[in-house]
Amino acid sequence: MLVVTLVYITFLIGMGFYDMKRVGSFEEYAVAGKKQGLSRVLLSILATAIGASATIGIVDRAAAIGFPAVWWLIVGSVGLIVQGLVLSKKVRELNADTLPDVAQKTIGAVGRRIIAAIIGVSWIGVIAAQYISMATVVSAITGKNNSRLMLIIIVAVTILYSVVGGQMSVIKTDMIQAIIMASGFLLVFLYLFFIDGSSNELVFDSVELTNKSFGGMDLFNLLFVVGGTYFLGPDIMSRNLVSKDGKTAKRAAIAAGIALGIFAVIIVLIGMWVINYKGELGGMSPLIYLLNEIIPYPIAVILCLGLVSTILSSLDTCLVNVASIIEHDIIGRDKVNEVRMIVAVIGVASLGIALFKTDIIGLLTGAYSIYAPGIVFPLFIGIMCHDKKKLNLPLLYIGIIAGGGIGLLNTYMKVGGSYFPLIGMGISLVFSLLALIPVAEKK
């Protein structure tokens, strides 16, 4: 598996250098020239959405709370479908280069800078979470519990092909990674439930949508805080911006939402199957135990590549997207070589966090808890009112700062409980609705 993985990532590097000569402008580097068709955008959304949280993180979550872990991705599925129905076409027709650029066109320059800063602060945690997942997979590949050197090598490769090829390479590699990922998990599902079948009865007897560990309020919180990032998050929206037109963006988001819902059920059922297996996990992640102890070797190789693919596909998108936002919306320039340097710096900084953290879902939840309260409702209202209604922008900005600030306090200073970000979303919603009240004209 180590040899196959090294060959695979070497191939990805080659694709990055192949595209390097074709990337001459910021638009080509950051949004792949805004000319991608339905199949590419659809597969890229799926590859981006199904990362660390959707594989190792969700299965580990299933071990803790049971089948309700499925809601982490189901709310993402709902967010994507609703995005496609009401938002995707409008966003693409703004012809923006980044999500803060969307804010510039809809709620002004101040909103752009605030949103860019929030993304820059929060998304370091998202990237670090991908690295932690990669460490788990690397341990399975090498057979060692501590494989920091191999992790650093794979991370360096990811940074390298992201640096040189930008979104041009990311879109292409996402297609390959999505196909490998889907093949790996589908083969595992078929083997476990239709060939082995020894845990089937226990799995289906324990299917429940809520339980003592995950109740209705948890679902409500997840729907807005996590679902909101799928509805109007920087990574998913970056796939919208690479689409060739609004119709493509809309269709891709809806189709990806449906596919993500199906994947959610499959991955949680796989996790439940392993948890109920007769063997002892011995503290090992259920997916890694599955990889090493249960499935036949050929399927294990495909699953291993699938796991590597899920993480790389989210990681490369995050790196290029955040670096483009820092260059375009914070620094205020569009120089490709500067974006490449920022990609490298962010990659190394996030790796430093990952080497000392282990909680994938915790890092992701923390990032989403800053982003969603501050941005989702104000920017959504701004987009929907664009060229239709004049907004009271100072009130909208207060909503962004208040919501994001509450999320920041919750994530980094541990103020409030697990539902505190939901309060932040409520406050930002109130100020966003107040911004709809017409401003009195001065005489």
Image (cartoon, rainbow, N blue to C red):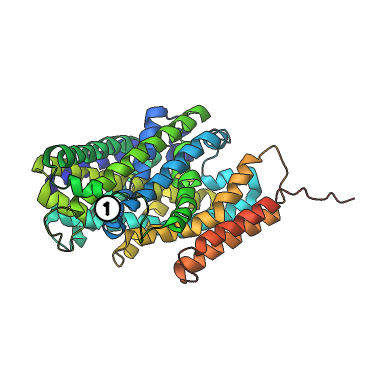
- Place of residue 37 in the rendered image (x, y in percent of width and height, measured from the top left): 42, 27
Residue at the spot of label 1: 59
In the picture, measured across the screen, residue 277 lies left or right of residue 392, that is left
Residue 63 visible in the picture? yes
- Place of residue 181 in the rendered image (x, y in percent of width and height, measured from the top left): 26, 40
- Place of residue 110 in the rendered image (x, y in percent of width and height, measured from the top left): 64, 54
Q: Amino acid at mark 1?
A: Val
In the picture, measured across the screen, residue 282 lies left or right of residue 103, that is left
- Place of residue 336 in the rendered image (x, y in percent of width and height, measured from the top left): 44, 45
The vertical placement of 375 against 188, above or below, is below
* Nearest the eye: 219 or 124: 219
Point 36% across, 50% down: residue: 209
* Nearest the eye: 217 or 90: 217
* Nearest the eye: 318 or 425: 425
In the picture, measured across the screen, residue 392 lies left or right of residue 102, that is right
Which residue occupies the extreme front position in the image? Answer: 205
Point 57% across, 35% down: residue: 90
Residue 271 visible in the picture? no
Q: Which structural element holds mark 1?
A: helix
The vertical placement of 425 against 379, above or below, is below
The vertical placement of 347 against 74, above or below, is below
Mark 1 crowd level (few <14, some 14–19, many ≥20, 10 Å Cα) = many
Badge count = 1
